[in-house]
Image (spheres, rainbow, N blue to C red):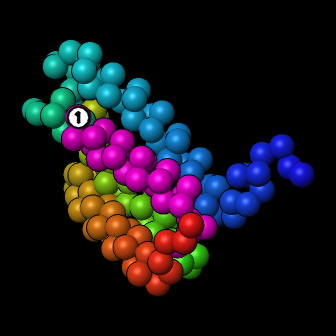
Amino acid sequence: MSANPVRSSMPDPIRGSFIFAALSAASGVMLGALSAHLPDRLFAVPGGRAMLHSAVEIQMWHALGLCLLSLNASRLSPRLIRMACLCMAVGMVLFCVPVILLALFDMKLGSISIGRIAPYGGTMLMIAWCLAAASAFRRPFQN
């Protein structure tokens, strides 16, 4: 018998989702501290602190959500929950990273603000939650 029965029963893509979520939460704590303590003059754009705070809040909530989805994956429709986890991870990256880079560095892709990527990430996050709901409809919770 394995010393860690959860690890042996968790499929690799779901384990990867959990690891991504845990690391996202860890980086969210660091970015939250940065948001709280960085002097205003070091933010690259006006309102940068609020922008960074919002990105961290979204990142932390979705890291928690992704952890919960990963831990409950065996009770949900396998294909849909894998898609939900993937969409959530991609959505977190596409939403949070551009907002963070905008707040701290006013980064641009050519002449376009990197912040223009964020709505695509937000859309992916909404799709992820819809897929998560659909996975529960397809396979009701079992004890």
Q: Position of residue 3 (x, y in %)?
A: 83, 43
Look at the picture and state if 40 lies above or below 84: above
Q: Which residue is mark 1?
A: 53
Q: Residue furthest bottom?
A: 138
Specify whether 112 is left or right of 21. Answer: left
Q: Position of residue 53 (x, y in %)?
A: 23, 34
Identify the residue at horizontal 40%, vertical 53% (top origin).
65
Three-letter amino acid code of the residue under disc 1? His
Specify the quadrant of the image occupied by residue 46.
Answer: top left
Report the magenta residues as a range.
53-76
Q: Which one is nearer the viewer's eye here, 74 or 122?
A: 74
Q: Position of residue 82 (x, y in %)?
A: 54, 70
Helix, strand or loop for the magenta stretch, by majority: helix
Q: Residue furthest left?
A: 46
Specify whether 65 is left or right of 101. Answer: right
Q: Is residue 32 visible?
A: yes
Specify the quadrant of the image occupied by residue 70.
Answer: bottom right
Q: Which one is nearer the viewer's eye here, 141 or 18?
A: 141
How many numbered badges does the structure rendering display? 1
Specify whether 130 is left or right of 7. Answer: left
Q: Secondary structure at mark 1?
A: helix
Q: Quadrant of the C terminus?
A: bottom right
- How crowded is the residue under tag 1: few (<14 C-alpha within 10 Å), some, or many (20+)? many
Q: Residue furthest right?
A: 1
Identify the residue at horizontal 21%, vertical 15% (top origin).
39
